Image (cartoon, rainbow, N blue to C red):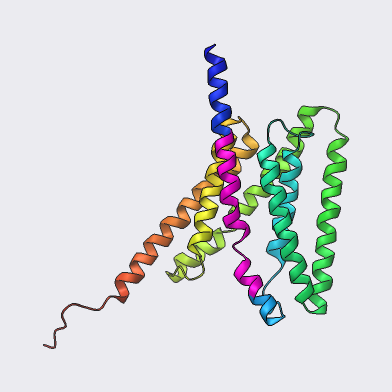
Amino acid sequence: MFFSVLDGTFKICRDAAGIAGNIFAFGLFISPLPTFKRIIRNQSTENFSGLPYIYALLNCLICTWYGTPLISYDNVLVMSVNSIGAVFQMTYIIIFIVHADREKKIKMIGLLLAVFGFLAIIVAGSLQIADRGMRWIFVGLLSCASLVSMFASPLFIINLVIRTKSVEFMPFYLSLSTFLLSTSFFLYGIFNFDAFIYVPNGIGTVLGILQLVLYFYYKTKSAEGSQEPLMVSHA
């Protein structure tokens, strides 16, 4: 009886964390909107790079495959959030290709085809693994590696903030969304006993906290530096 109640509690907590993660994910998904409004307005991709959206699409597709019942148990919320993310990334990539110059168009289309080709290899290869546990481990390791590298990407921005002592290139709401999303799925992975989810999202949580701490530290320092002195001595 006790273990049945405990199991039910864990499932409720898991689902709550997963739903929260799906909600917070929209903060990340819509964060590039100002960039793409500018691209559409100027009818040019200027010096923007399409690589982050290609990589984000690949990550979303791998994690969507991991969340399917063919690979893992009770991870529908992982599948849903990443499938929605894949739609957003595809939309951004299409807009980028439409407004890019010829050289960038060819490069982006080539990378997009490579993403779908790589996903096809992963799907076909994992389905060849008859043992369900080994299939779960194979795809789980791939999704974990993809998530870790995605969460590690802000290290460049963190280094830039420390070096310049400025938060100009670290948007607050993007950092906050990353922290909330990774924390939600860290808890989701804990309650679902899934190391392939809680390990990379635990790393994302730590990096998210670091970004927020740096943001408030340097924002405060900047505000203090810009304050007018209350009394000026001319002695």
Q: Is residue 56 above or below residue 219?
A: above
Which quadrant holds residue 13? top right
Q: Is residue 176 left or right of residue 18?
A: left
- Considering the image in quadrants, where does the N terminus appear? top right
Q: In percent of the image, x 81 and y 70: which residue is there?
A: 107
Q: Is residue 38 left or right of residue 176?
A: right
Which quadrant holds residue 32? bottom right
Q: Main secondary structure of the magenta part?
A: helix
Q: In percent of the image, x 73 and y 33: which residue is there?
A: 72
Q: In percent of the image, x 60 and y 70: which residue is there?
A: 34
Which quadrant holds residue 30? bottom right
Residue 112: % across, % down:
81, 61
Residue 102: % across, % down:
83, 78
| Residue 155 shows in this picture | yes
- Nearest the viewer among 234 and 75 is 75
Q: Residue 187 magenta-drawn?
A: no
Residue 220: % across, % down:
34, 65
- Considering the image in quadrants, where does the C terminus appear? bottom left
Which residues are drawn in magenta? 15-37
Q: Is residue 207 left or right of residue 107?
A: left
Q: In percent of the image, x 47 and y 66: which residue is there?
A: 161
